[in-house]
Image (cartoon, helix red, strand yellow):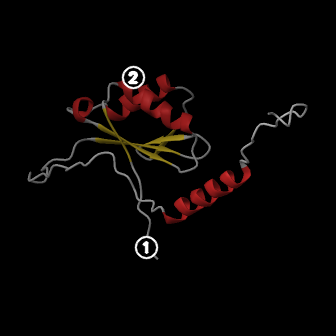
Amino acid sequence: MNFRKGRHREDPEINLIPFIDVLLVILIFLMVTTTYSKFTALQITLPTADAEKAMQRPFEINVAVDVQGRYAINNVRVAVADPAALAEELKNAAAGKTEATKDAVVIINADALATHQTVINVLEAARLAGFDKVTFAAQTRRKK
């Protein structure tokens, strides 16, 4: 016999609020107890060199770039606007040297606040002039 014939039966419902509360507590616990360590992707063993110091230094062309985008080659200011003109100035700086164009090293001394484009112009000029050895000069921070 069914005594509840006229009544509609409600479906049971799961209350999710306590479940979410428990998950948040677990999440906070995991965040507090997790140790964050530096992950290194590659283990590299760098080679060592036992060669003697070079007896002869290569020919160096120092290119300075200041904040305003002006260039100086071997401490002589040059007025150039594009990489092609700067390449000609680099070739002139190496003119008269017997092995200058083959083994010359272009050293870029750029101000920390110089724009990236002015430094890229020097790199492009070195490529156009045929200098394949380019390096950047940097200074180390003094310990206080």
Count every numbered label the image shows and give the total. Answer: 2
Rendered image: mark on residue 128: 2
x 40%, y 56%: residue: 38
Q: Element under label 1? A: loop
User: Could you say where residue 26 lies in the image, as x and y percent from the top left?
Assistant: 57, 58
Q: Nearer the viewer, residue 102 or 11?
A: 11
Q: Are marks 1 and 2 in contact (CB under 8 Å)?
A: no
Mark 1 surroundings: few (<14), some (14-19) or many (≥20) residues within 10 A: few
Q: In this picture, is 50 found above or below 6?
A: below
CA gap, disc 1 and disc 2: 40 Å
Q: Element under label 2? A: helix
Amino acid at dot 1:
Lys
Q: Earlier in the sequence, mark 1 or mark 2?
A: 2
User: Could you say where residue 48 lies in the image, as x and y percent from the top left?
Assistant: 14, 52
Amino acid at dot 2:
Leu
Q: Nearer the viewer, residue 47 or 85?
A: 47
Q: Is residue 19 left or right of residue 97?
A: right
Q: Nearer the viewer, residue 32 or 93?
A: 32
Q: In the image, which is nearer the foreground, mark 1 or mark 2?
A: 1
Q: In terms of image quadrants, where is residue 132? A: top left
Q: Split into 4 quadrants, where in the image is the N terminus?
A: top right
x 15%, y 47%: residue: 56
x 47%, y 29%: residue: 86
User: Could you say where residue 67 lies in the image, as x and y percent from the top left?
Assistant: 59, 46
Q: In terms of image quadrants, where is residue 79? A: top right
Rendered image: mark on residue 143: 1
Q: Is residue 89 visible?
A: no
Q: Residue furthest toward the right? A: 6
User: Could you say where residue 101 lies in the image, as x and y percent from the top left?
Assistant: 26, 29
Mark 2 surroundings: few (<14), some (14-19) or many (≥20) residues within 10 A: some
